[in-house]
């Protein structure tokens, strides 16, 4: 990994460490690491195929807030960080490409004791080929969300708001609407469109399973090394696909949880566009369906209260 990437990662980690040390007490948050593998999938209308693997780190570090004895009256703010390194191969490009996807931002949860809980988030980050970073051509990107959780009953809440996401391969401001409801003692259904639909079952205090459908795309700056018929030195790689998957989690102990996930990626589409005119495509191809695998480990900080969000135990 090159010097610029190492420096960026170290600075991010020092920011997290400093924030953690400045806390009087931590009411929520955690740190996680994960590894994702997507075996090669063939292109629909181009030679070869596409595969990648990713290692990643994410953290939510509580900063300040107020959580009194009443769990339905509180506010919390947090520092949120994410760093991923990805290696990918493309059948029509001879050399392997390495990407860095990282962000640093703030989040907040506000509940004034009524029926509404407000979730806000904003972050600034990068998503680029290492060669783009080395040439100092990196462009920063913004992501944000504002979600209202409206408690309809002890079992059901409605969700609405807006977000800016890259999950569909390009920056899209989208309205958000959803529902989360306990359909039995063990099963919970959640649909927050157009982000995710899931069924969750809690086997025991230590284990559970999730079934999900969600978009799984992204956008990266891509160094054009004579690969495309354009004079632009950098283009955008826009990946759009959907994931149907299952994840199984197990609490190793009070603070550590390990999760294994497998899924099927569908509707894959790779579109390389001009960086300064993302509507102009320089190369486009479909990607055939294929599997994905992910393994993650998460450490959760201690909370001041055992009562989780909306009064449900974590």
Image: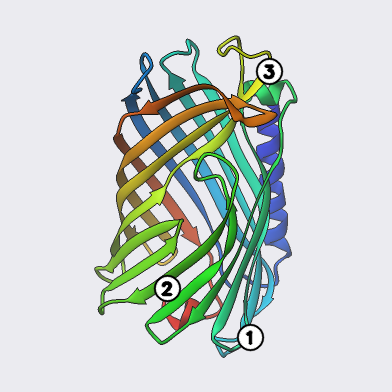
- Asked if residue 38 lies left or right of residue 68, the reply is left
- Seen from the viewer's position, the closer of residues 114 and 164 is 164
Q: How many marks?
A: 3
Which one is closest to the eye, mark 3 or mark 1?
A: 3
Quadrant placement of the N terminus: top right
Local SS, label 3: loop
Local SS, label 1: loop
**Residue 270, x across and y down, in percent:** 46, 29
Q: Would you name the residue on which mark 3 appears? A: 232
Q: Would you name the residue on which mark 2 appears? A: 314
- Asked if residue 101 lies left or right of residue 177, the reply is right
Circle 1 Cα neighbour tier, 10 Å, few/some/many (<14 / 14–19 / ≥20): few
N-terminal of the two: label 2 or label 1?
A: 1
Name above or below for residue 97 compared with residue 258.
above
- Seen from the viewer's position, the closer of residues 203 and 180 is 180
Circle 3 Cα neighbour tier, 10 Å, few/some/many (<14 / 14–19 / ≥20): some
**Residue 178, x across and y down, in percent:** 44, 68
Q: Which mark is residue 112?
A: 1
Name above or below for residue 116 compared with residue 192.
below
């Amino acid at each position: 990994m090159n010097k610029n990437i190492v420096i960026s990662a170290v600075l991010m980690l020092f920011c997290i460490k400093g924030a953690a040390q400045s806390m009087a007490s931590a009411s929520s948050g955690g740190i996680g690491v994960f590894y994702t593998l997507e075996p090669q999938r063939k292109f629909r209308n181009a030679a070869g195929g596409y595969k990648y693997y990713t290692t990643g780190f994410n953290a939510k570090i509580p900063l300040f807030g107020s959580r009194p004895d009443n769990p339905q009256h509180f506010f919390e703010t947090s520092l949120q960080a994410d760093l991923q390194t990805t290696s990918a191969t493309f059948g029509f490009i001879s050399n392997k490409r390495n990407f860095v996807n990282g962000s640093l931002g703030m989040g907040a949860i506000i509940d004034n004791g009524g029926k509404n809980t407000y979730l806000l988030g904003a972050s600034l980050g990068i998503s680029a080929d290492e060669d783009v970073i080395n040439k100092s051509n990196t462009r920063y990107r913004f992501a944000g969300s504002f979600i209202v959780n409206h408690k309809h009953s002890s079992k059901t809440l409605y969700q609405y708001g807006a977000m800016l996401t890259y999950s569909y391969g390009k920056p899209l401001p989208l309205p958000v609407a959803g529902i989360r409801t306990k359909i039995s003692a063990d099963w919970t259904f959640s649909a927050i469109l157009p982000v995710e639909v899931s069924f969750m079952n809690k086997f025991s205090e230590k284990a559970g399973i999730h079934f999900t459908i969600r978009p799984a795309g992204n956008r990266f700056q891509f160094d054009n090394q004579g690969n495309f018929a354009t004079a632009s030195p950098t283009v955008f790689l826009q990946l759009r696909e959907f994931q149907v998957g299952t994840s199984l989690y197990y609490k190793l102990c009070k603070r550590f949880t390990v999760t294994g996930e497998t899924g099927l990626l569908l509707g894959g589409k790779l579109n390389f566009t001009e960086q300064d005119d993302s509507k102009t495509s320089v190369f486009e191809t479909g990607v055939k369906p294929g599997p994905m695998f992910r393994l993650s480990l998460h450490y959760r900080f201690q909370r001041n209260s055992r009562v989780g969000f909306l009064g449900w135990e974590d």
